[in-house]
Amino acid sequence: MNIPKSQLPRIVVIGGGFAGISLIKQLQKSPLQIVLFDRHNYHTFQPLLYQVSTAGLEPDSIAYPLRKIFRKHPDFHFRLAEVLSINAEEKYVETSIGKLSYDYLVLATGTRTNFFGNKNIEENSMPMKTVPQALDIRSLVLQNIEAADISDNSEEKKRLLNFVIAGAGPTGVEMAGALAEFRKGILKHDYPELDENDMCVHLLEGADRVLLPMSPQASKKAQNALEKLGVKVHLNTFVENYDGTVVTTKDGKSFTTATFIWAAGVTGAPVKGIEAGVVAKANRYKVNTFNEIDGYKGIFALGDIALMTSEKYPYGHPQVAQPAIQQGKHLGKNIKRMLANKEMLPFSYFDKGTLATIGRNKAVADISKFHIGGAFAWFIWMFVHLWFLVGFRNRVVTFFNWTYNYINYDRAARLIIRPFNKKK
């Protein structure tokens, strides 16, 4: 794979998400050779994927080339590849482009969509974890609206304009709000033959409230905002099946739909060869307070794939961006301490709060003991997301897109560039 030989220790990082990027940034001036593997050549700002899928942003606004982030590092090497397995005894990784030895190994592989073993849902629903998946959703949504516009069959039109989302976490709530705003702001202008009331957005949640990780106050405000936008929220509703036409639930409900978006859960993405450190139920690596995987010396896990338990977090840290960023930064400092023959320091997570947006001037925020809603929370949400976007260009483009959309009640990226066809 053409990695040059070096007298410096080699650290191999698997995954260019928030955790991997944060770690490498911390190590840029260290006497190390850094090799990053990822299946994509870009970093994805996943909190804004839903805006790509609802035509609010183009994908290049939330993606940034991994090579460009670290191009000033003299001994950084990126390889576009899939890591197939790890040999911990001989200290090398097996990838789709060959083998590479390491001195230190960091797994920041994140999560994948969890379908809970339901093959029908896996085959027929639309997940949203990657940029291509978000673009598929955008195409399918627009294709179905276009098909409804020319349909004379009322039942078929209902199926095409019924949008069902499973999972009322931040992703599901934000997706539902964005689709509801699309209906109110775009449908009557672009599709005058369609009645705005013909398009329905259903949000299904198995728990007794939306945004379960957030405070009850935030959940109530979010649900009220969704319902004012016209979203039909169904609580205590567990999805049982989706055959490509009808969503059925365990309590006997059914929803005819051509667009079923699955945002009901994620599971860890461990790598073959390091199975001993995996906690089966969570599918995450059990790590100590230094992010070192139990039973493996010099192999670390960060972010969503790492399970670091404590009295405050008995089930590990939440699988969101902030723990990943903080763990990556902290491990970088610890590796520098290790290279200087100093003891590593334990990780301590600082919870900066939780945010979720529902739509225009509508968001909720839990910051310390404060529970904020409405326009002020919305402005906080926008500032935080702009701040953490990678790349000055992406921040500027996203800001101007949001400003344009806000002034014109528009979603300018409603383009079917790559038509989506469901697999048979």
Image: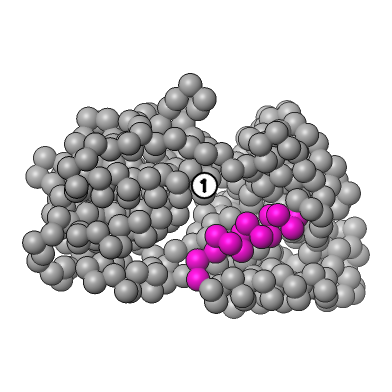
Q: Is residue 373 above or below residue 146?
A: above
Q: Secondary structure at mark 1?
A: helix
Which region of the structure is painted magenta? 378-391
| Quarter of the image where one finds residue 274 | top left
Nearer the observer, 375 or 165: 375
Name the residue located 21 percent from the left edge and 35 percent from the top edge: 296
Does the magenta segment cover residue 380? Answer: yes
Q: Where does residue 340 sit, x and y in percent of width and height?
A: 19, 47
Q: 30 left or right of 411?
A: left
Q: 163 left or right of 199?
A: left
Q: Amino acid at mark 1?
A: Gln
Nearer the observer, 312 or 131: 312
Name the residue located 51 percent from the left edge and 49 percent from the top edge: 321
Q: Is residue 424 visible?
A: no
Location of the N terminus (image quadrant): bottom left
Q: Is residue 396 above or below residue 353?
A: below
Q: Where does residue 225 sit, x and y in percent of width and height?
A: 83, 47
Q: Where does residue 102 sit, x and y in percent of width and height?
A: 16, 52
Nearer the observer, 11 or 172: 11
Q: Main secondary structure of the magenta part?
A: helix
Disc 1: which residue? 322
| Quarter of the image where one finds residue 75 | bottom left
